[in-house]
Amino acid sequence: MNGRPRTLAVMSGLLGTLLLAAGCGSSSGSGSNNSNKAAPAVPKVPVQQTVGAGEGQLDLVNWAGYAEDGTNDKTVDWVHPFEKATGCKINEKIGNTSDEMVTLMKSGQYDGVSASGDATLRLVYGGDVAPVNTALVANYATIQPFLKDRPWNSVNGQMYGIPHGWGANLLMYNSSSVTPAPTSWAAVFDASSPYKGKVTAYDSPIYIADAALYLKATKPDLKITNPYALDKTQLAAAVDLLKAQRKNVGEYWADYTKEVQAFESKNSVIGTTWQVIANLVTTDKKVGVQAITPKEGTTGWSDTWMIAAKAKHPNCMYKWMNWITSAKVNAQVAEWFGEAPAQSLACAETADKGFCTTYHAADKVYSDAIAYWTTPTTHCLDGRGNICTDYTAWTQAWTDIKG
Amino acid sequence: MDRYQGLTQRGSGWLHRHSNARLLGLLSLPAAWLVLAYLGALAAMLLAAFWSTNDFTGAIEHTTTLTNFTALVTQPVYRTIAVRSLEVAVLVTVVDAVVAMPMAYFMAKVASPRTRRLLVVAVLTPLWASYLVKAYAWRVMLANGGVVDWLLAPFGMHGPGYGLPATVLTLSYLWLPFMVLPLYAGLERIPDTLLEASADQGARAGRTFRSIVLPLLYPALFAGALFTFSLSLGDYITVKIVGGATQLASNVIYDNITTGGNLPFAAAAAFFPILVMVVFLVGARRTGALDEL
């Protein structure tokens, strides 16, 4: 009877002490101001010089569908052949968002990651990934030239990974519930009210760029040039648009299986998607869906396989980077995921001979038109100076949008 | 041999005379565990709330600042989320108490010993199934055209779909055993003779319940409420599965760790459930519920 009040007193005392400690320190710590800092220097991480025998194991962080071992579809398996050829047993950890991938890589437990452009630079400048010695990856030579030495996969001419593939975030809709067929992102923004409660959207702050892309086309007054470079006014406009959309959103998705299930039960009938999700829904044949590129253009991803700075199995990782970009495997993964393969020779190996044409795999102009996921920083990506909102601001805005 | 025996005897004699030393020897190991591993980890986390992260790389910067708390207090969205989380926790507790009370009463006072054992097993069995399986089962049942819709269709009604009501429903289901068991144990301790005496004095069932059972059951009800309330307040998975687009306080913590990579902000947000629980316990102590526990 006596012990409990004392425990409570101790607990509140502990809290009080902590608050007090912070109160004292805050005046001295308030001088840190990050907004005017230039991009920090790249941490020096040694480059691997040779690839020896495999270490017998490989721990990967990757997007769903990038390391298939036949469990989803018996004919889709490039993990077992890799394990047989190299002796490297693969442990796959799926990252649902780029943010999750960065967090997972920071844990230091993984050898490599299939990072999109909104994760790559955060990993490079955080010292979490090592530069890649492209001479050790034989298949790098025939990677599409317009994917090499790009701002999201290299720093000062040094490659930090091997390009894997790229594609667009599409608009998916249930073809029987959504009529007429939409041609614009307006169907999920300004004109989404007919589908109230059945609209879905990607649950990550990076989705703000989708709203910005729509505003770029529909509200020229805002003068948005790059959906990842938004000043305070532009971000506020995007946030307002997304808050209006929130009223009609049934649920947000980050886990791709959740979107598959929501579309199949008709809990969602329209929203942003990846081609692989549309493929899975189509394969299950429960509902009819279409995935289109709306007229305002799309955001998209360009993925790069990166090796962890402190990889425990670096040889296996180098073998994997070469394996996944080999013509046959790159064709398989591109067809399964529904993206343009990075390997130029992969186009000859696809089961559907018109695949690379459909996905514009060799079309530099088409590729350049996609607004690839990039980490927003205070230093504007469109060169307007240090007036832009950074990813932390986007994260807080995202919480605010969801309400 | 003798020497050792003598030593042991002298030692135990000394310990017998010095009761404080005896207590220290017995408690130092568990106390060290509690302070270092448990409270230490908690303190380290709470200390992190006063740090910040680098905007670009997400690396933690160890300079003391109150910005996290300022953001949490000044931005209206966090107040909305906090109020919503409290409402959910209170609603789940009330629903569980209302559902569990007749169940527990039947188990403790009406059922035969054999039925009673079967009922206890029935209440406990769902605890053996994975939390995720149960939450996803509700997702399937609450889906468009799912079991709930099908059951309500004859009455011209429609299931709640995904959202806050679905979250309260699923959480109430998940934590129900934690309410039933304390109530059952509490009711079992109330002698039947008290109820009979009340009836002899002419009190109806409702009067007996209000004047006899409920006051005696208060500590048990509090124990159950402590479980359902704190578990609901800390939950972030159920709301992701059946909550539609809603978010709760723990989602803010989770999202800031996994999505934002902002550990300090998450730690600051973690102050909210801690403060709520402290207030809850202090309030419960004032009403005397802790005295009999």
Image (tube, rainbow, N blue to C red):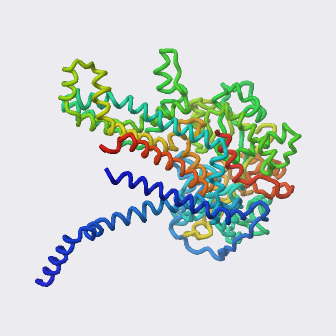
Where is residue A367? Give x, y as percent.
Answer: 79, 50
Residue drawn at the location 63% of the way across and 50% of the way down: A97
Q: Nearer the viewer, residue B38 or A364?
A: B38
Taking A240 as reference, is A177 left or right? left
Residue A355 vertical position relative to residue A308 in the rendered view, above or below: above
Quadrant in which the N terminus of chain B is drawn:
bottom left
Residue B123 vertical position relative to residue B55 in the rendered view, above or below: above
Residue B222 occupies quadrant: top left
Mark count: 0
Quadrant in which the C terminus of chain B is drawn:
top left
Where is residue A83? Give x, y as percent.
Answer: 53, 62
- Is any atom of residue B16 visible in this view? yes
Q: Nearer the viewer, residue B119 or A32?
A: A32
Where is residue A48? Give x, y as percent.
Answer: 65, 74
Q: Nearer the viewer, residue A174 or B129?
A: B129
Where is residue A268? Give x, y as percent.
Answer: 62, 32
Residue drawn at the location 64% of the way across and 63% of the way down: B59
Residue B168 vertical position relative to residue A366 in the rendered view, above or below: above
Taking A55 as reference, is A327 left or right? right
Q: Nearer the viewer, residue A266 or A167?
A: A266
